[in-house]
Amino acid sequence: MTHTKLPHHHGEKQETAFIREQLNHVDDFQTVADVFKQLGDTTRIRIFWLLCHCEECVLNISAMLNMSSPAVSHHLRPLKNSGLIVCRREGKEVYYRAADTEQSRLLHQMIEQVMEITCLNNSNQH
């Protein structure tokens, strides 16, 4: 693939060609955007965070979040489809937990770090 010259030359570095090539991988960036869309909802973040700490059934998740089971199921579906959570069936009960993936672990860490920063900023305002 040929690259056009950049409009302004600022002493292009060797990594510029690599960066420009990566920018052409739109599908990879779409995957990232899709994951962040899942976490663009407060309820999904809460459910994901909960499932990073324990494995739970829909009824228990519903009780912890003061939501109906159908509402919780509505949020679990896209989290599962995106690969952030997994489930297992035991008899009639289905248990959910965060997927054991690097992506899931990084998102969990990010959520906790942002919450910590937010909590620190909020406590400094009082």
Image (cartoon, rainbow, N blue to C red):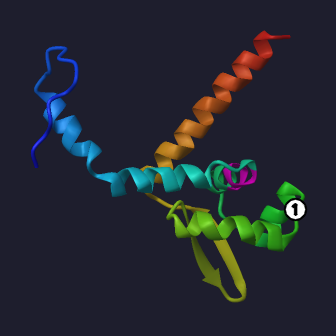
Q: At 70% from the left edge and 50% from the top edge, which residue is drawn? A: 41
- Please state the horizontal and vertical placement of residue 22, each as a whole percent of the image: 24, 44
Q: Is residue 14 above or below residue 93?
A: above
Q: At 70% from the left edge and 56% from the top edge, which residue is drawn? A: 47
Q: At 65% from the left edge and 63% from the top edge, which residue is drawn? A: 55
Characterize the magenta stretch by its predominant secondary structure. helix
Q: Is residue 3 left or right of residue 84?
A: left
Quarter occupied by residue 81: bottom right
Please name whichever residue, 40 or 70, is drawn nearer the observer in this view of the structure. Answer: 40
Q: Is residue 123 visible?
A: yes
Q: Is residue 18 left or right of residue 50?
A: left
- Please state the horizontal and vertical placement of residue 73, each as a whole percent of the image: 74, 71
- Please state the horizontal and vertical placement of residue 79, each as a whole percent of the image: 60, 63
Which amino acid lies under the numbered mark 1 shown in the image of this protein? Met
Q: At 22% from the left edge and 18% from the top edge, which residue is drawn? A: 8
Q: Is residue 86 above or below residue 46?
A: below
Q: Is residue 94 above or below residue 125?
A: below
Please name whichever residue, 24 or 50, is drawn nearer the observer in this view of the structure. Answer: 24
**Does 111 lie within the magenta span?**
no
- Please state the horizontal and vertical placement of residue 110, each as a whole percent of the image: 54, 37
Mark 1 lies on residue: 67
Please name whichever residue, 64 or 37, is drawn nearer the observer in this view of the structure. Answer: 37
Task: Estimate how packed mark 1 is, as few (under 14), some (14 to 19) or many (20 or more) residues with alpha carbons within 10 Å.
Answer: few
Query: Which region is colored magenta?
Result: 43-47
**Does 44 lie within the magenta span?**
yes
Number of marks in the rendered image: 1
